[in-house]
Image (spheres, coloured by chain):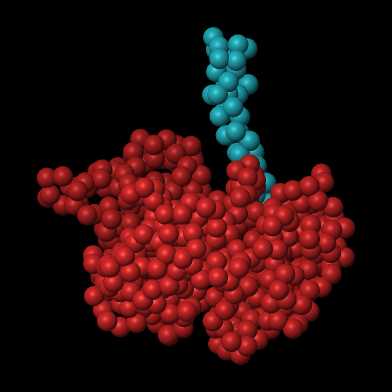
Chain colours: A cyan, B red
């Protein structure tokens, strides 16, 4: 994992590369927090009302959600 | 104002320069102030008795002719043409270290560092030229205090217990007032949630509540907002609101603090007096200000620079930032090219020709909205999307009564925008075609995939397609700068991303934009997700 495969595996010779790969992976993982929050926000604010099949309400919600973006 | 700095030179000879204290000023010219002293000290620079700038020796100097050169900060340079009495003082002791009347440039007028309305400006700690508090009299301060009170109340109604933070807390606790060299007001809150996802969701909810109350809100990161308040003097002032939370014994407060802390040191909130009014501050102000500015927070420092550890910056970058990448660059582009005549793109003409039955045209990255206006004038409904409203606002205002032209804020770096705006477009009459001209060059992989995801959603259920144009070879003909494209993108990379999005390129054209021997080349792709 994180660059340990290959001839240098386990000998620590590629430690620098492994740390860089690890740092990159950590940053990617941290960024998932925003992705998950965004997705949850859209689901709770928009998709749940969609399930109620209230066309007028949906139009209104889409308009409002759009207007709140900044 | 002339930015001529070629001359300069003191009116009097160097030998006449007074050398007071240990500062040893060797020269003042168009480059800056050359100082012999290397002793660590804070220095205030004043023009005609008014503070303009502050610096730390030796931190802010650079090696030059065996001494330290303090370069004039870039924002100040356009003003340096005229005569002024320059004084350097030690703000701690209040002693004058140097004073001399001299001239920069050619003008015989006094140097006036003021904005177009004539209000005095000075450099804040980030070296931005701003209207700082020390030049605002009581009549100007009252509206700001009203605004702070109002936003604190609004945040309270939105369900968070906000308090004065950063420079505003420091000023209140240390001096009972606004810091003279500061220019904005900062508020903070500590969430009851302890996971970044929940704190971010709460920030979205706070934003909606504030918008419902009628405030204009700008999002700076996933947990930092600017709340705009129209002050009673008519000034639109933005108050920064920084979100925070406690987790595993650490306090995280966007965007500088990540430190071991106890919740009791924040809540229940105490109060501090700011210009005669009481405002909420964290319970233990000493610990809070030490966490913010270090143990020397009691000593004023107009040139303070945060020494936030790289690990904290990276943590906040990963958790909360990344949604404003490229915004300043595009703002600069639109400002620089405001005078450029804008006309419809080749993509717009091609779409009109290829889709005579077109019902809705969507321009992702519409800029000033030339294509939107062109389609609307032809009787086709057009939607302009851009993350830089500054660019499309003039056209939007001109088209306020035109039902065929609509503009919408749209940020490809925010999934909420991508999903909600695309769902809105997908309900418009079809066929719908999406255009995207000179946008993807300045996006990263995530932004480009979001663009393709948005286009796919917008075209869904119609025979619509995406018309994409980007720079594929950067020539020396000014085209990359003129269009804002800046750098070329390899078509092979875009092809791979289209495939990743489940799309198909049905046409690919590469063409030179001019007959110039080293012409720039654009690549145009027509992409659909129908098969």
Position of B247 relative to B344 (above/below)? above
Total tally of numbered discs in the picture: 0
Residue B401 figure quarter: bottom left
Quarter of the image where the N terminus of chain B is located: bottom left
Q: Position of residue B159 (x, y in %)?
A: 80, 68
* Image position of B164 (left or right of B14): right
Q: Position of residue B301 (x, y in %)?
A: 60, 63
Position of B272 relative to B232 (above/below)? above
Q: Position of residue B447 (x, y in %)?
A: 49, 48
Closer to the camera, B61 or B77? B61
Position of B276 relative to B23 (above/below)? below
Closer to the camera, A18 or B166? B166
Residue B219 figure quarter: bottom right
Quarter of the image where the C terminus of chain B is located: top left
Task: Please report the residue visible at 76 percent of the width from the left and 77 percent of the height from the top.
Answer: B273
Position of A22 relative to B485 (above/below)? above
Q: Position of residue B246 (x, y in %)?
A: 79, 51
């Amino acid at each position: 994992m994180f660059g340990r495969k290959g001839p240098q595996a386990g000998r620590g010779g590629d430690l620098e590369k492994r740390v860089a790969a690890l740092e990159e992976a950590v940053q990617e993982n941290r960024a998932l927090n925003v992705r998950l929050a965004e997705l949850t926000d859209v689901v709770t604010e928009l998709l749940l009302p969609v399930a109620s099949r209230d066309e007028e309400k949906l139009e209104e919600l889409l308009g409002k959600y759009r207007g709140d973006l900044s | 104002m002339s930015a001529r700095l070629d001359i300069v030179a003191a009116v009097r000879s160097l030998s006449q320069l007074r050398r007071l204290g240990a500062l040893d000023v060797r020269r003042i010219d168009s480059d800056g102030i050359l100082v012999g002293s290397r002793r660590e000290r804070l220095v205030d620079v004043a023009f005609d008795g008014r503070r303009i700038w502050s610096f730390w020796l030796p931190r802010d100097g650079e090696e030059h002719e065996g001494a330290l050169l303090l370069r004039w900060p870039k924002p100040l340079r356009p003003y340096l043409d005229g005569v002024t009495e320059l004084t350097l003082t030690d703000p701690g002791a209040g002693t004058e270290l140097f004073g001399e009347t001299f001239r920069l440039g050619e003008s015989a007028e006094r140097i006036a560092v003021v904005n177009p309305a004539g209000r005095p400006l000075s450099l804040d700690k980030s070296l931005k030229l701003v209207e700082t508090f020390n030049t605002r009299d009581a009549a100007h301060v009252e509206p700001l205090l009203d605004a702070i009170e109002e936003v604190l109340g609004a945040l309270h109604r939105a369900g968070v217990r906000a308090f004065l933070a950063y420079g505003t807390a420091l000023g209140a606790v240390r001096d009972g007032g606004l810091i003279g060299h500061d220019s904005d007001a900062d508020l903070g809150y500590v969430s009851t949630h302890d996971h970044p996802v929940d704190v971010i969701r709460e920030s979205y909810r706070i934003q909606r509540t504030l918008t419902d109350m009628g405030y204009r809100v700008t999002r700076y990161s996933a947990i930092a907002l600017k709340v705009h308040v129209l002050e009673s003097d008519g000034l639109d002032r933005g108050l920064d609101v920084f979100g925070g939370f406690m987790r595993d014994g650490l306090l995280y407060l966007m965007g500088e603090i990540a430190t071991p802390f106890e919740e009791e040191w924040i809540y229940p909130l105490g109060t501090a007096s700011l210009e005669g009014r009481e405002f909420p501050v964290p319970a233990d102000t000493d610990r809070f200000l030490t966490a913010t500015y270090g143990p020397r927070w009691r000593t004023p420092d107009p040139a303070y620079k945060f020494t936030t550890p790289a690990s904290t910056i990276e943590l906040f970058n990963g958790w909360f930032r990344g949604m404003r990448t490229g915004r300043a660059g595009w703002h600069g582009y639109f400002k620089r090219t405001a005078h450029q005549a804008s006309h419809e793109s080749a993509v717009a003409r091609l779409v009109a020709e290829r889709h005579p039955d077109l019902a809705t045209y969507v321009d992702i990255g519409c800029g000033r909205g030339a294509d939107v206006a062109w389609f609307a004038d032809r009787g086709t409904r057009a939607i302009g999307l851009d993350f830089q409203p500054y660019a499309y606002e003039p056209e939007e205002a001109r088209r306020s009564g035109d039902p065929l032209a609509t503009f919408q804020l749209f940020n490809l770096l925010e999934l909420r925008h991508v999903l909600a705006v695309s769902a809105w477009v997908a309900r418009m009459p079809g066929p719908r075609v999406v255009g995207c001209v000179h946008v993807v060059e300045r996006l990263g992989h995530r932004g480009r995939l979001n663009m393709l995801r948005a286009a796919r959603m917008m075209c869904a259920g119609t025979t619509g397609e995406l018309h994409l144009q980007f720079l594929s070879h950067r020539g020396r003909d000014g085209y990359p700068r003129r269009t804002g494209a800046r750098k070329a993108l390899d078509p092979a990379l875009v092809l791979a991303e289209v495939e990743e999005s489940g799309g198909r390129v049905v046409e690919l054209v590469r063409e030179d934009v001019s007959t110039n021997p080293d012409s720039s080349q654009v690549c145009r792709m027509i992409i659909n997700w129908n098969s």
